[in-house]
Amino acid sequence: MTNNIPDIKGDRVLVCPLNWGLGHASRCIPIIKELVKRGKKVLVGAEGASLVLLIKELQGIDIERFIEINGISLRYSKGNSQTWAIVKHLPGWLGKITDEHKEIEKIVEERDIDTVISDNRFGAWCRKAHSIYITHQVMIKAPKGFRWAEPIIRWIHGRIIRKYDECWIPDREQDGISGDLSHKHKLPGNCKFIGTLSRLADIEPCVISPDEQSDTVAIISGPEPQRSIFEKEVIDSQKGRNEKTLIIRGLPQNSETQTDGNITLAPHMDAAAIKAQLLGAKKIICRSGYSTMMDLDAIGVSAEICPTPGQSEQEYLAEYLTGKNIHRKWER
């Protein structure tokens, strides 16, 4: 899969994913590994749990430097609509995007960066470096009741995309899994499909014994408080069943694994262990986040999926992918 990653300019590369959940960081892992394999000097800029994940997953890889770069953050609401959770963040985001852009320019100057690769960071472009933007949703889905605003949102996002020299779309041009998000409308001229990205694609699963294999594997992801809400829903649905359930909590900053009856709560697992558990599971439960969908696509397994309530992109993907019988709706 990494063979689809285009050539980039220069030898010194800064890769900086957005810190909304872990998906943006996890899908940058195969890019980073491939660039190092090609002899590039890679610097990684991230924050929070995404930075922790990248440091853990890239152990043994010759990364020149990890840099903390703060960006826009989001905390979802507890309810079924995230519209106002997003709206109330907008004024602060504008300032943070400007700060992010200034920080990127400073790093490019100080570290002699040739190429910047931004996974959905709006401000991570620089005139003094070749700038690449990664997004699977060139068309951003508006929440229900705001669909009239989609052309406006697409125009604004298009303006952001055009600030970059290239826009990489992590999907297949034909028979893709992002649907309307990148296939419905004419794309800006700097866009190109690079194939799906998954940290699970080009690694061997670790060997686990039958006793270690779980019947049900749940992958918990996304910003709080919805991450914790989903975790509790999965625990409640699986508690006391006559089957082993592994819940991967998406908390790489934590370290303690806990077992209560038939349920094991693992804060984090490396990619080889996750791949082994997913390939051997009888049932997989997860959010319909795009990076998770790419992981499942990469290893050819199906899941029961549940979108984050009110998160329009995940709601669309859940409807689209269950409609194509690729995945099924999670029935609690």
Image (cartoon, rainbow, N blue to C red):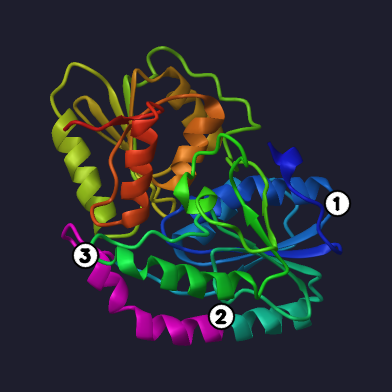
Front label number (2 vs 1): 2
Which class describes the residues within 10 Å of circle 1: few (<14), some (14-19), or many (20+)?
few
Secondary structure of the residue carrying tag 2 is: helix
* First in residue order: circle 3 vs circle 2: 3
Rendering coords of residue 33 (x, y %): 71, 46
Rendering coords of residue 291 (x, y %): 48, 45
Residue 257 position (above or below residue 156)? above
The magenta span reads: 76-100
The label number, if any, that marks residue 39 in the structure image: 1
Residue 150 position (above or below residue 2)? below
- Alpha-carbon distance for marks 3 and 1? 44 Å
Residue type at the position of mark 2: Glu
- Alpha-carbon distance for marks 3 and 2? 25 Å
In front: 68, or 120?
120
Q: Residue under circle 2?
A: 100
Q: Residue under circle 3?
A: 77
Rendering coords of residue 312 (x, y %): 32, 56
Query: Magenta: predominant secondary structure element?
Result: helix
Res 267 visible:
yes
Residue type at the position of mark 3: Ser
Q: Quadrant of the C terminus?
A: top left
Whether 78 is among the magenta residues is: yes
Which class describes the residues within 10 Å of circle 2: few (<14), some (14-19), or many (20+)?
many
Residue 155 in the figure: left or right of residue 192: left
Residue type at the position of mark 1: Gly
Secondary structure of the residue carrying tag 1 is: loop
Secondary structure of the residue carrying tag 3 is: loop
